């Protein structure tokens, strides 16, 4: 097991533990933060696997507990589900001393984190991410949000957890599609700022995309190191943290057009496709080499991830462009994209002209 610290000027430091067997000892690790009642928020699938043991363990520490189980899937990141969760927490009688525990993937972490941020203007919460994507991305950094029909993660708050427990053993129960989805976010970290890490992921560590536990543990640790360093410098995305959105402006627009249907395109798959598009657009604009763009595409393909629009469906270029202009990273309606000078050297490009992006999308197969 490895323990990493996330710290920054604007929030209390907290630890991220990565390793095997953490779910078995989760109650004891959570106990220092559980001063009274504990509400465990999970989805119905994950709750069936892990909730009983966690609740029994918490009760053994003297905590009064309840389980709030929501339907699995992106549709739970909604105003209606948030309202139901908040009502359940009120009915349980949580007060400001009490604790919320998010047990599940990124949907649960985002929903539970936002509920904790809003409840009585903010109570403590702990993240126990059970998917690869959540372990390397959404559980660290304090971003919490729900979706709206106009876009993904458009309503939310920054609310840092008190503790994150990333149990590698939990990943063994994931469908292959979810492992690949999380692997896309791992690859993204290398593409942003660590070319040697990307090389390792493309070579010796490539087994992680197929569920190899040792490769997964190293990949999670390095991803958390990269993300925590960026979050520590820029908690609220005023500058450097925007780099973590590589692939997301393209990807979120594609997800929105597909109605956020995970069965059609998982979030990490959309990020992978977005990264491929970002590198090809960067090459087209003379920012990086064609060789880098081709290599990124090849590594993503080798991991079983999509790299072309046609693999996700049929899209209208103007519609995608409008969604990208409405992205929360846009300013004054102008596009903000994360582009690349090379593998491991991404940068934030503000005020990107719409016409070159429209022409690029059409050349990529959008109508």
Image (spheres, grey):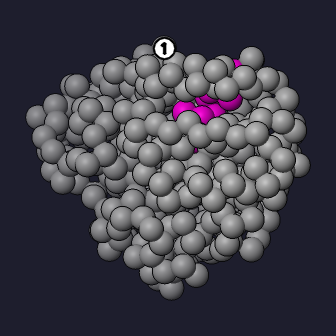
Q: Position of residue 240 (x, y in %)?
A: 66, 41
Please tell me whether residue 114 belongs to the stretch shown in magenta. yes
Frontmost residue, 280 versus 112 = 112
**Magenta segment range?**
109-119
Residue 86 higher or lower than 66, as above or below: above
Frontmost residue, 196 versus 42 = 42
**Mark 1 burial class by Cα count in 10 Å: few <14, some 14-19, many 20+:** few
Q: Looking at the image, which residue is at 23% across and 54% down?
A: 308
Q: Looking at the image, which residue is at 66% across and 63% down?
A: 23
Q: Which quarter of the figure has residue 231?
A: top right
- Is residue 234 something one can see in this rendering? no
Q: Looking at the image, which residue is at 80% across and 32% down?
A: 98
Frontmost residue, 28 versus 351 = 28
Q: Quadrant of the N terminus?
A: bottom right
- Is residue 349 something one can see in this rendering? yes
Q: Looking at the image, which residue is at 36% across and 65% down?
A: 175
User: From the viewer's perspective, is 23 left or right of 329?
Assistant: right
Residue 255 higher or lower than 45, as above or below: above
What residue sits right under mark 1 in the picture? 332
Q: Quadrant of the C terminus?
A: top left
Please tell me whether residue 167 belongs to the stretch shown in magenta. no
| Predominant SS along the magenta part | helix
């Amino acid at each position: 097991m490895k323990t990493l610290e996330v710290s920054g000027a604007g929030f209390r430091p907290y630890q991220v533990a990565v390793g095997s067997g953490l779910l078995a000892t989760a109650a004891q690790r959570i106990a220092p933060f559980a001063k009274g009642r504990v509400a465990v928020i999970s989805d119905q699938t994950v709750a069936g696997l892990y909730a009983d043991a966690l609740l029994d363990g918490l009760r053994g520490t003297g905590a009064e507990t309840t389980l709030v189980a929501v339907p699995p899937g992106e549709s739970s990141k909604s105003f209606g589900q948030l309202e139901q969760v908040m009502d359940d927490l009120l009915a349980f009688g949580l007060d400001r001393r009490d604790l919320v525990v998010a047990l599940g993937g990124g949907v649960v972490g985002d929903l539970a984190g936002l509920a904790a941020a809003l409840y009585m203007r903010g109570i403590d919460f702990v993240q126990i991410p059970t998917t690869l994507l959540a372990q390397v991305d959404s559980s660290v950094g304090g971003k919490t949000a729900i979706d709206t029909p106009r876009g993904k993660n458009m309503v939310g708050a920054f609310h840092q957890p008190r503790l994150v427990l990333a149990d590698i053993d939990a990943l063994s129960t994931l469908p292959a599609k979810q492992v690949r989805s999380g692997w896309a976010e791992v690859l993204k970290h290398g593409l942003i700022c660590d070319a040697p890490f990307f090389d390792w992921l493309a070579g010796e560590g490539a087994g992680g995309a197929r569920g190899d536990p040792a490769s997964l543990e190293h990949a999670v640790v390095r991803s958390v190191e990269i993300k925590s360093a960026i979050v520590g410098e820029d908690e609220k995305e005023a500058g450097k943290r925007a780099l973590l959105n590589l692939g997301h402006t393209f990807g979120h627009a594609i997800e929105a057009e597909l109605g956020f249907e995970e069965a059609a395109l998982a979030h990490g798959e959309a990020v992978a496709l977005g990264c491929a598009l970002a590198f090809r657009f960067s090459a087209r604009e003379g920012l990086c080499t064609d060789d880098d763009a081709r290599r990124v595409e090849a590594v993503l393909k080798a991991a079983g991830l999509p790299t072309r629009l046609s693999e996700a469906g049929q899209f209208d270029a103007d519609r995608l462009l409008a969604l990208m202009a409405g992205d929360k990273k846009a300013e004054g309606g102008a596009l903000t994209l994360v582009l690349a000078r090379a593998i491991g050297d991404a940068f934030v490009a503000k005020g990107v002209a719409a016409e070159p992006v429209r022409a690029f999308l059409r050349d990529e197969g959008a109508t």
